[in-house]
Amino acid sequence: MKADEAFAIGLAIERNGFAGLFATEDREIGMRNFVEGGPGRPGSADRERPGVGLRGRGAAPGRG
């Protein structure tokens, strides 16, 4: 596989994943928070694990 083919495949994967994010409640919350108050700490629609920050998802210590 040539580098340009691999790059095109990677872009297609990223494009599909990014487009899928626009169908989430988190996107709606994030956009609303940005419009109302500018960039800052986003809200979350994490209904399955309430109260779990980034640390519970494997973030580096001290981040979440």
Image: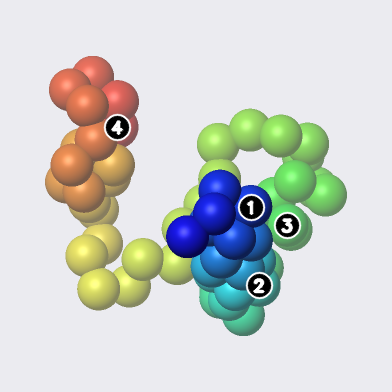
Q: Residue at x 56, y 65 (%)?
A: 9
Question: Label 1 vs label 4: CA separation?
Answer: 37 Å
x and y, in percent, of residue 27 in the image: 62, 65
Q: Nearer the viewer, mark 1 or mark 4?
A: 1
Taking the spot 25% from the left edge, 62% from the top edge, the residue there is: 50
Q: CA distance from mark 2 to mark 3?
A: 15 Å
x then y, percent, for residue 15? 64, 66
Q: Which residue is mark 1?
A: 4
Look at the numbered disc 2 and give the secondary structure of its residue: helix
Q: What residue does disc 4 label?
A: 64
Mark 2 or 3, which is nearer the eye? 2
Mark 1 or mark 4: which comes first in sequence?
A: 1
Sequence-first tag of 4 and 3: 3
Type of amino acid under label 4 = Gly
Label 2: which residue?
A: 19
Kindly identify the amino acid type of the residue bearing the numbered disc 3: Met
Q: Quadrant of residue 49?
A: bottom left
| Residue toward you, 51 or 14 | 14
In the image, residue 38 above or below residue 29: above
Q: Which mark is residue 46?
A: none
- Answer above or below: position of 50 versus 16: above
Mark 3 against mark 1, which lies toward the viewer? 1
Label 3 and label 1: CA atoms lie apart by 34 Å
* CA neighbours of label 3 inside 10 A, class few (<14), some (14 to 19), many (20+): some
Residue lying at 77% horizontally and 39% vertically, measured from the top left: 37
- Say which element carries label 4: loop
Is residue 61 found left or right of 41 in the rendered image? left
Q: Is residue 18 visible?
A: no
Residue 48 position, x and y percent, is 25, 73
Mark before the other along the chain sequence, 2 or 3: 2
Q: In the rendered image, which residue does mark 3 sit on?
A: 31
Dot placed on the residue nearer the N-terminal end, 3 or 1: 1
